Image: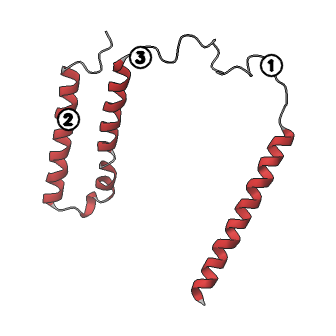
Amino acid sequence: MLVTVEFTYILILFFISLGLSIILFFLGYFLMFKVAYEDKLMGYECGFDPFGNARGEFDIRFYLVAILFLIFDLEITFLFPFSVSIMSMTLFSYSIMLIFLIILTIGFIYEIKKGALDWS
């Protein structure tokens, strides 16, 4: 019986959020300004005309920077649990995290020395 009551509250909150979402969607639709002009109807709204072919050559440095950003960004996310539990860590776990940071720093220095982020 206790499980049913908990699921009932979840079901009630689900219907409230669904109803509120529907109300806000239609309220925004009916209250918005419906002024259409040529720039707004273009494929891109970034302020300049689209140019070139979408299948044209693309510089590989954009991909390289994106991959390097993902690698270092994902490695930095390992620091969040470390920062939360730093007060209850042992010397061994602290040294493991220090080794991880040293390897991360060496990788970053290697990346800079190889010129991976150099655009010239």
Q: Going 77% across and 16% down the picture, which residue do you hit?
A: 38
Q: Which residue is mark 1?
A: 37
Whether label 3 touches label 1, CB < 8 Å: no
Q: Which mark is residue 58?
A: 3
In 3D space, how far apart are the residues under numbered discs 1 and 2 (Cα atoms)? 51 Å
| Residue 30 sits above or below residue 62 on the image | below
Q: Quadrant of residue 105?
A: top left
Q: Going 22% across and 26% down the picture, which residue do you hit?
A: 111
Give the foreground label among 3 and 2: 3
Q: Amino acid at mark 1?
A: Tyr
Q: Position of residue 118 (x, y in %)?
A: 29, 16
Q: Going 20% across and 42% down the picture, which residue do you hit?
A: 101
Q: Which residue is mark 2?
A: 105
Give the foreground label among 1 and 2: 1
Q: Is residue 96 left or right of residue 49?
A: left
Q: Going 31% across and 31% down the picture, which residue do you hit?
A: 68
The colouring scheme, among rainbow, by chain, secondary structure or one colour, is: secondary structure
Q: Which mark is residue 5?
A: none
Q: Position of residue 29 (x, y in %)?
A: 82, 41
| Residue 53 sits above or below residue 3 on the image | above
The C terminus: image quadrant? top left
Q: Amino acid at mark 2?
A: Thr
| Residue 38 sits above or below residue 97 on the image | above
Q: How many marks?
A: 3
Q: Earlier in the sequence, mark 3 or mark 1?
A: 1
Q: Position of residue 89 (x, y in %)?
A: 22, 61
Give the foreground label among 3 and 1: 3
In this orientation, which residue lies closer to the viewer: 100 or 67? Answer: 67
